[in-house]
Image (cartoon, rainbow, N blue to C red):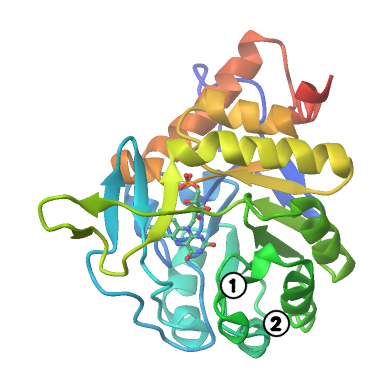
């Protein structure tokens, strides 16, 4: 495709380990549907990747409505990982994404280690760019403790997906106690990158009904509130492991936010909640990054990755 003269000159291409992406901005899991839903707002193939909403090996209805609500300038959700399951996704969402030439990262989840293994097995041989293992969900076998709060449970879900031959990214919880040990465990078990991170545990109460706003009670806070927490996690993990590919996600709504995430040490950035307010935001963020790079004489993102570490 030819470049318009007004297009920024800098390239925001990047790589996450062995995965080369045409752009550093991806759509975060759960915020862009299971397929090409956002194609009406921009060219999905121009973004780094579309990360699907997390898929289980089976269809899953998710939680009671209401599932999403405002939380000040942030947002809270308890969608409950509703989805069609891998098999149905392969014949629908996946095909839609292929039809628009999007780079696809398939996110998987499970309630047990075996369910992660089953989701991975169902995706075996599918030529997605990577599989993102959503380890930030509740573990039925450990009284619903979040897998990613535990180095051992994280290692188990990563190891259980080793049937996959594509790179495996593991999506962690930025507030995990001992996050660095969780990261080390994930890498030892076979993860080639970490995605930092997921939503923050939260609650919103409607004082008129005197009840939690969401059908599930509590939920996950995303958007503004998640940004400094994710930025810190990316910074700390980069300081701990200078060579580990990192995907930063949490409250990125502007190109400045995305650039800060890269300077903290992210190799690529996912954008989620902001797309509910402005579905064109991912493309605007990408363009804004390249315009900033042009203004500052930065030709490649490699020049600013981890710059905040001095
Ligand atoms: C409505 C909603 C649904 C989500 N569903 C998933 C999901 O299925 N799997 C997952 O790994 N993360 C899921 N997330 C978390 C996002 O991918 C992201 O990690 C988090 O929202 C922080 O980024 P953001 O502030 O840019 O949204 C969901 C977030 C929202 C708001």
User: Would you place residue 305 above or below residue 20 in this image?
Assistant: above
Q: Which mark is residue 125?
A: 2
Residue shown at 34%/81% (left/top)? Answer: 61
Is residue 3 visible from the viewing direction of this image? no
Disc 2 vs disc 1: Cβ atoms closer than 8 Å?
no
Residue 147: image x %, image y %?
65, 71
Residue 181: image x %, image y %?
82, 57
Q: Is residue 301 left or right of residue 241?
A: left
Q: Earlier in the sequence, mark 2 or mark 1?
A: 2
Q: Is mark 2 within 8 Å of ligand 1?
A: no
Q: In this view, does 247 lie to the left or right of 140?
A: right
Residue shown at 52%/82% (left/top)? Answer: 86
User: Would you place residue 148 above or below residue 50 in this image?
Assistant: below
CA–CA distance in space, label 2 to label 1: 31 Å
Residue 152: image x %, image y %?
79, 73
Residue shown at 78%/23% (left/top)? Answer: 307
Q: Which mark is residue 31?
A: none
Task: Provide the secondary structure element on which disc 1 rests.
Answer: strand
Q: Where's the C terminus, which quadrant? A: top right
Of tags 2 and 1, the one toward the viewer is 1
User: Would you place residue 272 above or below residue 215 in this image?
Assistant: above
Q: Which of 169 and 216 is in front in this view?
A: 216
**Residue on which the image places disc 1:** 145
């Amino acid at each position: 495709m030819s470049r318009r003269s007004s297009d920024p000159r800098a390239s925001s291409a990047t790589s996450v380990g062995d995965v080369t992406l045409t752009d550093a901005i991806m759509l975060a899991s759960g915020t862009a549907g299971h397929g090409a839903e956002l194609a009406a707002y921009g060219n999905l193939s121009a973004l780094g990747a579309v990360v699907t909403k997390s898929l289980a090996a089976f269809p899953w209805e998710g939680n009671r409505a209401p599932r999403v609500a405002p939380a000040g300038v942030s947002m809270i959700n308890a969608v409950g990982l509703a989805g069609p399951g891998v098999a149905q996704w392969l014949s629908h969402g996946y095909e839609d994404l292929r039809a628009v030439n999007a780079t696809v990262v398939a996110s998987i989840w499970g309630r047990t280690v075996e369910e992660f293994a089953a989701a991975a097995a169902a995706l075996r041989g599918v030529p997605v760019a990577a599989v993102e293992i959503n380890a930030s969900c509740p573990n039925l076998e450990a009284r619903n403790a979040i897998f990613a709060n535990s180095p051992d449970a994280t290692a188990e879900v990563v190891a259980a997906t080793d049937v996959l031959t594509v790179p495996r990214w593991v999506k962690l919880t930025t507030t995990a106690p001992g996050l660095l040990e969780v990261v080390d465990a994930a890498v030892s078990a076979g993860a080639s990158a970490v995605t930092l991170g997921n939503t923050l545990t939260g609650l919103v109460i409607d004082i008129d009904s005197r009840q939690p706003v969401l059908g599930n009670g509590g939920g996950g806070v995303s958007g503004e509130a998640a940004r400094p927490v994710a930025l810190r996690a990316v910074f700390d993990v980069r300081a701990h492991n200078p060579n580990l590919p990192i995907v930063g996600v949490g409250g990125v709504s502007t190109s400045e936010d995305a650039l800060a995430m890269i300077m903290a040490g992210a190799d690529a950035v996912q954008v989620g909640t902001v797309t509910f307010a402005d579905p064109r935001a991912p493309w605007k963020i990408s363009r804004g990054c390249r315009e900033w790079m042009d203004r500052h004489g930065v030709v490649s993102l490699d020049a600013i990755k981890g710059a905040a570490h001095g």
